[in-house]
Image (cartoon, rainbow, N blue to C red):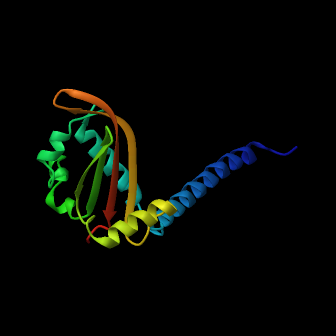
């Protein structure tokens, strides 16, 4: 008859060895995947977040007061709390449509012809181009002028340039 007590403890030790080897392999693979990770382009996501933050800044509970935009026509991003360094990367265009009228407010390089063409092409193809991210946010809203509120729509276009390193 053989003594099997020794073989049982050897199998137990082998389980611990296998677990240590697997743990070490996961650590090595995790570190190497973090180091060799692809660059992720987040400009489109950043443009979407910027559009949502601007929307939250200039509206109150689905109501907008265009007088606020008129007072801050050239400084909409500063009004919303963005610094001068950040503003250089952003271009925004806000269109408020109500009662057959459209009011447009913009800040950034939207006046340049190539940006206008870029907006049209990117909107048509629903893609990012070059080093820019684009987002369009549109929703119905109440427009209040002199205590009179009416139904309207707001359209916010945001363009984010690549970060200057």
Q: Can you name the residue that lies furthest to the front here?
A: 100
Quadrant into which the N terminus falls: top right
Asked whether 88 or 122 is in front, the reply is: 122
Q: Image check: 135 left or right of 143?
A: right
Q: Residue at coordinates 72% horizontally, 47% vertically from top-left? A: 6
Q: Is residue 112 above or below residue 60?
A: below
Q: Residue at coordinates 31% horizontally, 71% vertically from top-left? A: 113
Horizontal and vertical percent for residue 58? 23, 41
Residue 108 visible in the picture: yes
Asked whether 83 or 5 is in front, the reply is: 83
Q: Is residue 136 above or below residue 39?
A: above
Q: Is residue 60 above or below residue 38?
A: above
Q: Can you name the residue that lies furthest to the left here?
A: 71
Quadrant into which the C terminus falls: bottom left
Q: Image check: 80 left or right of 122?
A: left
Horizontal and vertical percent for residue 144? 23, 32
Residue 61 visible in the picture: no
Horizontal and vertical percent for residue 72? 13, 48
Q: Examine the image and state in which quarter residue 97 appears.
A: top left
Q: Can you name the residue that lies furthest to the right here?
A: 1
Q: Residue at coordinates 28% horizontally, 56% vertically from top-left? A: 92
Give the total of numbered labels: 0
Q: Residue at coordinates 64% horizontally, 54% vertically from top-left? A: 18
Horizontal and vertical percent for residue 47? 35, 55
Asked whether 149 or 55 is in front, the reply is: 149
């Amino acid at each position: 008859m053989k003594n099997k007590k020794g073989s049982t403890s050897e199998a137990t030790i082998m389980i611990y060895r296998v677990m240590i080897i697997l743990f070490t392999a996961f650590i090595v693979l995790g570190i190497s995947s973090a180091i060799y990770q692809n660059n992720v382009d987040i400009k489109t996501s950043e443009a979407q977040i910027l559009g949502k933050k601007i929307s939250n800044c200039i509206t109150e509970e689905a109501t907008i007061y265009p007088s606020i935009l008129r007072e801050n026509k050239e400084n909409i991003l500063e009004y919303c709390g963005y610094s001068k360094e950040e503003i250089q990367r952003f271009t925004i265009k806000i269109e408020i449509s109500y009662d057959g009228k459209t009011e447009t407010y913009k800040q950034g390089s939207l006046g340049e012809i190539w940006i206008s063409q870029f907006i049209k092409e990117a909107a048509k193809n629903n893609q990012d181009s070059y080093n820019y991210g684009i987002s369009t946010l549109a929703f119905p809203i109440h427009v209040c002028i002199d205590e009179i509120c009416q139904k309207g729509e707001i359209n916010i276009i945001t363009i984010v340039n690549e970060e200057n390193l």
